[in-house]
Image (cartoon, rainbow, N blue to C red):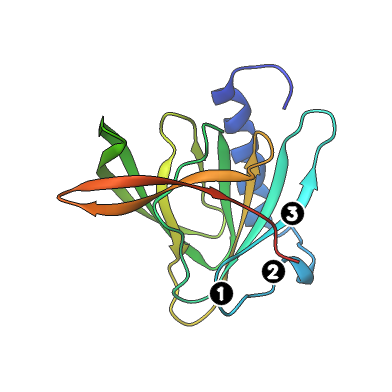
Amino acid sequence: MRGGSIPDITSSIQAALQSAARDGSLALPRALTAVRPDAYARRLLHRDPTTGYTIVVMTWGPGQQTSLHDHAGMWCVECVVDGALRVEQFDRIEEREGRLRFARQRVVHAGVGDAGCLIPPFEYHVLGNALADRASVSVHVYAGEMDRCNVYVEAGAGWWAREERSLSYDA
């Protein structure tokens, strides 16, 4: 977490998470992986007092997903530790009068041990459970405290409106 470029830091974190998820050494407390029936869950695993980075466990019930969102300019590494996730990645291609246009770049189906990095300005995506019959769990390492982000709501004719959202942790 200290020193080095953002790509170097995120690559190191990505490799460590992939290894731990694949060899089963990333054991998470059961309380952090419980499914919420109404929405995906965000639970804080660790906050580093020196560097400020945070590690968040997210649990996804069948059919649960995020809206199209950004990461408020903060890098993130995400890794699947149980189940599978579907990730739609977008690039922002135009902004006019507070509205934005996006181009979908690709859809990734990620299984256990698969990890990806979001480094601004490439930070727009929709993330959700790829399984219809059971929960999925992912671990997210953020450069700091991700307590807000922008969510994008369809505004018609290919345009999206930006809405800032406050984020919190589930108990």
Please tell me which residue is depicted at 65% across the width and 33% down the height of the picture.
143
Circle 1 or circle 3, nearest the eye: 3
Residue occupied by mark 1: 135
Tell me the crowding category of disc 1: few under 14, some 14 to 19, or many 20 or more residues within 10 angstroms, Cα based. Answer: many
> Which disc number belongs to residue 33?
2
Residue occupied by mark 3: 44
Residue at the front extreme, as displayed: 97
Please tell me which residue is depicted at 46% across the width and 64% down the height of the picture.
65
For badge 1, the amino acid type reads Ala
Looking at the image, is 164 positioned above or below residue 23?
A: above
Task: Using residue 102 as the reference point, say whether residue 27 is left or right of it.
Answer: right
SS for dot 2: loop
Looking at the image, is 166 positioned above or below residue 130?
A: above
Say whether disc 2 or disc 3 marks the residue closer to the N-terminus.
2
Q: CA distance from mark 2 to mark 3?
A: 11 Å
Q: CA distance from mark 1 to mark 2?
A: 9 Å
For badge 2, the amino acid type reads Thr
Say whether disc 1 or disc 3 marks the residue closer to the N-terminus.
3
Task: Using residue 19 as the reference point, say whether residue 64 is left or right of it.
Answer: left
Task: Using residue 8 as the reference point, say whether residue 116 is left or right of it.
Answer: left
Q: Where residue 108 sits: x, y (%)? A: 37, 53
Mark 1 and mark 2 in contact? Answer it, CB < 8 Å: yes
Please tell me which residue is depicted at 56% across the width and 67% down the height of the picture.
40
Q: Where residue 158 sits: x, y (%)? A: 18, 48
> Which disc number belongs to residue 30?
none
